[in-house]
Image (spheres, rainbow, N blue to C red):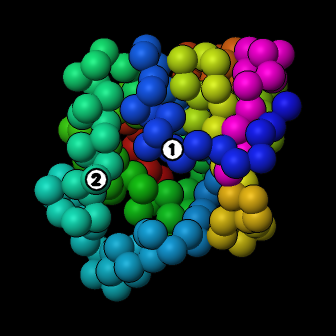
Amino acid sequence: MPQNEPPRFDELLADARRSAIHLEMRDGYAVPDEADDYRRWRETGERDVDPASPYWAPWVEMVRAAAARGVVMRRVRIVSEPVSDYIRYEHAGTAVNMLAGEDVRWLPRRQAAGLLIPAGDGWLFDDEQLLLNHFTGTGEWAEPALELCTDPAIVTAYASAAETVWDRAVPHHQYKIR
């Protein structure tokens, strides 16, 4: 099933030909690459939404390059309501994800009742490769942080779940934080 050393996310996205979908299910993160921006948002209420900023530019460039090749990028977030501060932070920055070329939707966890969904976050590339993200209970990267899965049965099940969640989720411009 998994391989020992997964390729990096940017390598997988660079190799994608048709699609990349991120299924997110955590209500909080504690990963180092977001720490400064998240702290600033908590202190000031202002989120970095400049696509050219050092925080966003690498992401925006990757997504735009993928979109230019015809890769459809989607992100769906399953969230608990009322939402956590971290989800408020994510929501405040989603305009940059969309400006870069992602389509983003939100699914309140209570509306996921009855769905068979995976246990964790992951990125699915071309319905062929699944990069699973592993986090601790406090939202930090676990060891190993990433796991690549190419097992057709698991990838197909994940793809089916992601599509079902996507179909039920609310487009970003319609999802209002409570």
Rendered location of residue 63, percent (x, y): 31, 36
Q: Which quarter of the figure has residue 141?
A: bottom right
Element under label 1?
A: helix
Q: Is residue 138 left or right of residue 81?
A: right
Check disc 1 and give the amino acid type: Phe
Confirm whether the magenta stretch covers residue 18.
Answer: no
Q: Residues within 10 Å of mark 1 (few under 14, many from 20)?
A: few
Q: Which residue is mark 1?
A: 9
Of mark 2 and mark 1, the one earlier in the sequence is 1
Question: Residue shown at 22%/66% (left/top)?
Answer: 54
Q: Which residue is mark 2?
A: 58
Element under label 2?
A: helix
Q: Is residue 108 left or right of residue 136?
A: left
Q: Nearer the viewer, residue 14 or 142?
A: 14
Q: Could you tell me if residue 1 is visible in this image?
A: yes
Residue 52: assigned label:
none
Q: Which quarter of the figure has residue 152?
A: top right
Q: Is residue 99 left or right of residue 3?
A: left
Confirm whether the magenta stretch covers residue 155.
Answer: yes
Q: Could you tell me if residue 110 is visible in this image?
A: no
Rendered location of residue 20, percent (x, y): 48, 26
Give the magenta part as a residue range.
146-157
Question: Residue shown at 55%/25% (left/top)?
Answer: 125
Question: Residue shown at 85%/31% (left/top)?
Answer: 1
Check disc 2 and give the amino acid type: Pro
Rendered view: 22 above or below 38:
above
Rendered view: 83 above or below 165:
below
Rendered view: 108 above or below 168:
below
Rendered location of residue 61, percent (x, y): 24, 43
Rendered location of residue 11, percent (x, y): 46, 39
